[in-house]
């Protein structure tokens, strides 16, 4: 029995054409799963942000905007927000520009170029747990990086290495480096797909007009790659705002909360302090921050009309 024949029970005055309902029947299973796993939990979290829910054996108690007032006075929250914005400002520009340069490099028709593509993409397929532990060993006091620094005669002012993960001045930047290293190959592939969609005739015509070498990328590549630049900017901004695994594995938010981000603070409140309602309040603020950044990013790139 076809899907169309299954709709014979619908009165004709309910729908002009029964076939109009068929696409929604195909969408229904996915919408049902999304509703149960995404939308309904999000609504519950929104409700819990206005309640007090510390005793999980008791129903939540409505407290209105109490959690938001506590959040406003929470010095740790504001520090994690600053850390998150610093993370955003430090990581996103690199992940927008550097992968494009790599994509232009590996888009050349050279012998063995596929090996370079695989080399740059390898960090993407490595588990963040493995990557975090490996970089934590590299950052150790007697790790490879400090040994190289100590044995380099061109850096005489550093005698005992750099406290990569144990100094409030260095910790968050050390974690940023891992995020950049892990994301370069992923965004490079996105750019590479865009570069390969540009016809070669465009570059040939530009070469005749005198636009060649680096200038052809300013004149042709960047303007035609604008949709991909917007996509990478939005995705990398959202990912940087939600960073968690690197912080959890490498620094646990320390030292002195210097590398603690909003998501890690949310995790602490929810699963260590069991302050579920307060964690939901932090999650709601995080959602608003991500939404605002996404809209701002799109407006700055003229993707939303004024």
Image: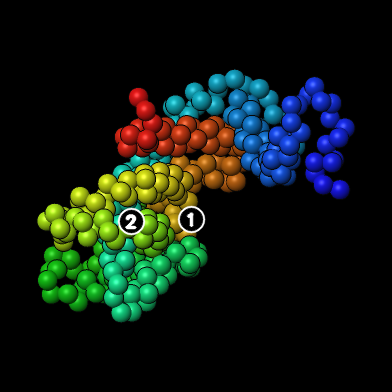
Instruction: Give SS at disc 1.
Output: helix
Precedes in sequence: disc 2 or disc 1: 2
Q: Is residue 99 visible?
A: no
Q: Is residue 156 visible?
A: yes
Q: Nearer the viewer, residue 13 or 133?
A: 13
Residue displayed at 85% across by 40% down: 6
In this rendering, is residue 93 above or below 106? above
Label 2 belongs to which residue? 198
Rendering coords of residue 279 (x, y %): 56, 37
Q: Is residue 273 left or right of residue 203?
A: right
Instruction: Give SS at disc 2.
Output: loop
In this rendering, is residue 54 above or below 252? above
Label 1 belongs to which residue? 245
Which residue lies most toward the bottom here? 111
Query: Do residues under tags 2 and 1 come within 8 Å of each other at their CB atoms?
Result: no
Q: Nearer the viewer, residue 260 or 84?
A: 84
Rendering coords of residue 218 (x, y %): 20, 51
Q: Quadrant of the C terminus?
A: top left
Front label number (2 vs 1) = 2
Mark 2 Cα-neighbour bin, 10 Å: few <14, some 14–19, many ≥20: some
Residue displayed at 40% across by 59% down: 193
Rendering coords of residue 72 (x, y %): 44, 26
């Amino acid at each position: 029995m076809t899907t169309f024949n299954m709709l014979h029970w619908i009165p004709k005055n309910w729908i002009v054409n029964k076939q109009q309902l068929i696409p929604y029947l195909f969408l229904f299973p996915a919408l049902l799963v999304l509703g149960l796993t995404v939308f309904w939990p999000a609504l519950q979290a929104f409700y819990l942000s206005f309640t007090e829910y510390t005793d999980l054996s008791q129903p939540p108690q409505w407290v209105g905007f109490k959690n938001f007032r506590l959040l406003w006075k929470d010095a740790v929250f504001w520090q994690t927000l600053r850390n998150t914005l610093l993370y955003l400002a430090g990581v996103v520009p690199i992940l927008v520009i550097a992968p494009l340069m790599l994509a232009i490099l590996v888009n050349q028709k050279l012998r063995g170029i596929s090996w370079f593509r695989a080399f740059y993409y390898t960090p993407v397929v490595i588990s963040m747990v493995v990557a975090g532990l490996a970089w934590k060993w590299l950052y150790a006091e007697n790790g490879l990086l400090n040994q190289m620094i100590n044995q380099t005669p061109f850096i005489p002012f550093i005698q005992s290495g750099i406290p990569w993960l144990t100094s409030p001045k260095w910790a968050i930047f050390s974690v940023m480096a891992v995020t950049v290293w892990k994301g370069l190959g992923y965004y490079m592939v996105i750019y590479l797909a865009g570069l390969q969609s540009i016809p070669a005739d465009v570059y040939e015509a530009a070469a005749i007009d005198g636009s060649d070498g680096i200038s052809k990328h300013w004149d042709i590549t960047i303007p035609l790659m604008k949709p991909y630049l917007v996509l990478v900017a939005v995705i990398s901004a959202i990912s940087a705002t939600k960073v968690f695994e690197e912080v959890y594995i490498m620094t646990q938010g320390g030292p002195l909360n210097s590398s603690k981000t909003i998501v890690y603070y949310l995790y602490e409140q929810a699963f260590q302090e069991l302050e579920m309602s307060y964690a939901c309040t932090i999650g709601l603020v995080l959602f608003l921050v991500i939404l605002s950044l996404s809209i701002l990013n799109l407006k700055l790139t003229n993707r939303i009309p004024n």
